[in-house]
Amino acid sequence: MDFAKASCFSWYFKKKGYELDDIKSISGGIVELGSHSAKKFRDVAFLVKDYNPKVTSKNNIDIDLQKCFLLDKDPKFISAVDAIKNL
Protein backbone atom coordinates (compact mmCIF):
# COMPACT_ATOMS: atom_id res chain seq x y z
CA MET A 1 0.00 0.00 0.00
CA ASP A 2 3.01 2.30 0.47
CA PHE A 3 3.65 2.14 -3.27
CA ALA A 4 0.00 2.92 -4.04
CA LYS A 5 0.17 6.02 -1.86
CA ALA A 6 3.49 7.14 -3.35
CA SER A 7 2.05 6.58 -6.81
CA CYS A 8 -1.05 8.57 -5.91
CA PHE A 9 1.05 11.53 -4.78
CA SER A 10 3.14 11.21 -7.93
CA TRP A 11 0.04 11.43 -10.16
CA TYR A 12 -1.18 14.41 -8.13
CA PHE A 13 2.20 16.20 -8.28
CA LYS A 14 2.36 15.59 -12.03
CA LYS A 15 -1.13 17.02 -12.51
CA LYS A 16 -0.15 20.14 -10.54
CA GLY A 17 3.15 20.55 -12.38
CA TYR A 18 5.26 19.97 -9.25
CA GLU A 19 8.79 18.58 -9.26
CA LEU A 20 8.71 14.76 -9.36
CA ASP A 21 12.30 13.76 -8.57
CA ASP A 22 11.79 13.08 -4.85
CA ILE A 23 8.54 11.17 -5.21
CA LYS A 24 10.04 9.13 -8.06
CA SER A 25 12.95 8.24 -5.78
CA ILE A 26 10.54 7.12 -3.07
CA SER A 27 8.51 5.03 -5.53
CA GLY A 28 11.68 3.58 -7.04
CA GLY A 29 12.97 2.60 -3.60
CA ILE A 30 9.72 0.82 -2.80
CA VAL A 31 9.90 -1.09 -6.09
CA GLU A 32 13.57 -1.93 -5.53
CA LEU A 33 12.90 -3.35 -2.07
CA GLY A 34 9.62 -5.00 -3.02
CA SER A 35 9.10 -8.67 -3.72
CA HIS A 36 6.75 -8.18 -6.68
CA SER A 37 7.60 -7.71 -10.34
CA ALA A 38 7.95 -4.25 -11.87
CA LYS A 39 4.88 -5.05 -14.00
CA LYS A 40 2.74 -5.52 -10.89
CA PHE A 41 3.93 -2.20 -9.52
CA ARG A 42 3.10 -0.58 -12.86
CA ASP A 43 -0.36 -2.16 -12.79
CA VAL A 44 -0.93 -0.76 -9.29
CA ALA A 45 0.22 2.68 -10.47
CA PHE A 46 -2.40 2.67 -13.23
CA LEU A 47 -5.03 1.32 -10.83
CA VAL A 48 -4.28 4.33 -8.61
CA LYS A 49 -4.48 6.71 -11.56
CA ASP A 50 -7.92 5.38 -12.49
CA TYR A 51 -9.17 5.21 -8.88
CA ASN A 52 -12.13 7.53 -8.53
CA PRO A 53 -13.76 7.28 -5.11
CA LYS A 54 -17.18 8.78 -4.61
CA VAL A 55 -16.29 11.39 -2.02
CA THR A 56 -17.01 15.00 -1.41
CA SER A 57 -14.87 17.56 0.34
CA LYS A 58 -16.17 19.92 2.96
CA ASN A 59 -13.17 22.20 2.36
CA ASN A 60 -12.94 21.95 -1.44
CA ILE A 61 -9.83 19.77 -1.28
CA ASP A 62 -8.78 18.47 -4.68
CA ILE A 63 -10.25 14.97 -5.02
CA ASP A 64 -7.01 13.77 -6.66
CA LEU A 65 -5.18 14.68 -3.45
CA GLN A 66 -7.90 13.50 -1.10
CA LYS A 67 -7.99 10.04 -2.68
CA CYS A 68 -4.36 9.49 -1.65
CA PHE A 69 -5.54 9.42 1.96
CA LEU A 70 -8.40 7.01 1.22
CA LEU A 71 -6.63 4.21 -0.65
CA ASP A 72 -5.79 2.09 2.37
CA LYS A 73 -9.30 2.44 3.80
CA ASP A 74 -11.30 1.49 0.69
CA PRO A 75 -12.10 -2.25 0.68
CA LYS A 76 -12.69 -2.28 -3.09
CA PHE A 77 -9.32 -0.66 -3.79
CA ILE A 78 -7.55 -2.99 -1.36
CA SER A 79 -9.16 -6.00 -3.08
CA ALA A 80 -8.07 -4.73 -6.48
CA VAL A 81 -4.47 -4.35 -5.28
CA ASP A 82 -4.58 -7.83 -3.74
CA ALA A 83 -5.82 -9.24 -7.04
CA ILE A 84 -2.84 -7.69 -8.84
CA LYS A 85 -0.41 -9.02 -6.23
CA ASN A 86 -1.85 -12.52 -6.53
CA LEU A 87 -1.70 -12.76 -10.35
Image: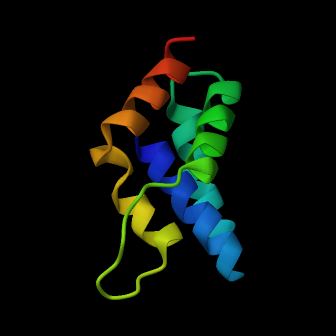
According to the image, what is the colour scheme of the structure?
A: rainbow
| Residue that lies at the very extreme toward the bottom in this rendered image | 59
Q: Nearer the viewer, residue 18 or 70?
A: 70
Seen in the image, is 16 located left or right of residue 33?
right
Count of all numbered marks drawn on residues in the image = 0
Seen in the image, is 22 located left or right of residue 57?
right
Which residue sits at x=61%, y=57%? 25
Quadrant of residue 53 in the image? bottom left
Quadrant position of the N terminus in the picture: top left
Residue 20 to residue 78: above or below: below
Question: Residue 85 location, x and y as percent?
Answer: 51, 20
Question: Residue 28 location, x and y as percent?
Answer: 62, 46
Which residue sits at x=69%, y=74%? 15
Q: Is residue 1 visible?
A: yes
Seen in the image, is 3 located left or right of residue 25?
left
Which residue sits at x=58%, y=37%? 44
Question: Residue 87 location, x and y as percent?
Answer: 57, 11
Which residue sits at x=57%, y=53%? 7
Q: Is residue 19 visible?
A: no
Q: Nearer the viewer, residue 82 or 28?
A: 82
Quadrant of residue 54 in the image? bottom left
Residue 23 to residue 34: above or below: below
Seen in the image, is 28 located left or right of residue 39?
left
Question: Residue 30 location, x and y as percent?
Answer: 52, 42
